[in-house]
Amino acid sequence: MSAFNEPQLETAFVDLFKEQGYDYVHGEAIVRDSRDVILYEDLRSFLRERYEADGITENEISAAINHLESTEGGSVYAQNAEAIRLIMKGFAIKREDTSKPNLFISLIDYNNPKNNLFKFVNQFQIEENHLRIPDGIVFVNGIPLVVLEFKSAIKENTTIEN
């Protein structure tokens, strides 16, 4: 019996997520700037549909996305903690029509999970200080929430430090 290798493990996860109803896309098929980690089309689509009854505008959608991205400054930990807080708790944005009250934005529909866009992407290239290609990323509404790396999981002598 041959050892379970990285491509087999990656394929197994792709199949698992597809079975759970996630859309699957190979990272190379997504046209974007490799510095972007958000799937903007998915996030815009989710916000447009979720707040359609509130009359959300494209500028307000952009404002919501800018608010999520404005977690810059401070340590990486502080930035991530703030992004998670916004994802979990939501936030308000000012309306273009100032006669309307602020619109409270929830980036995930916790009450109706089927309203969310679930996507599993493998081999998603990310360039920051250097190129990274995680084996898999779970996106909810275009927001990367889980990063999976399979290399260490299949090595028999791997320790937690590896």
Image (tube, rainbow, N blue to C red):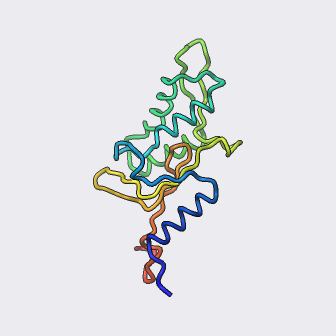
The residue at the far left in this view is: 129
At a point 70% along the width and 42% down the height, the residue shown is 112
From this view, report whether residue 146 is shown above or below residue 63: below
From this view, report whether residue 73 is shown above or below residue 24: above
In the image, is 72 to the left or to the right of 41?
A: left
The residue at the far right in this view is: 111
Q: Position of residue 17 (x, y in %)?
A: 58, 59
From this view, report whether residue 78 is shown above or below residue 68: below
Within the image, what quadrant is residue 19 found in? bottom right
Q: Position of residue 14 (x, y in %)?
A: 53, 61
Q: How many marks?
A: 0
At a point 46% along the width and 38% down the height, the residue shown is 40
Within the image, what quadrant is residue 161 found in? bottom left
Q: Position of residue 135 (x, y in %)?
A: 44, 62
Q: Nearer the viewer, residue 141 or 31?
A: 31
Q: Position of residue 68 (x, y in %)?
A: 48, 37
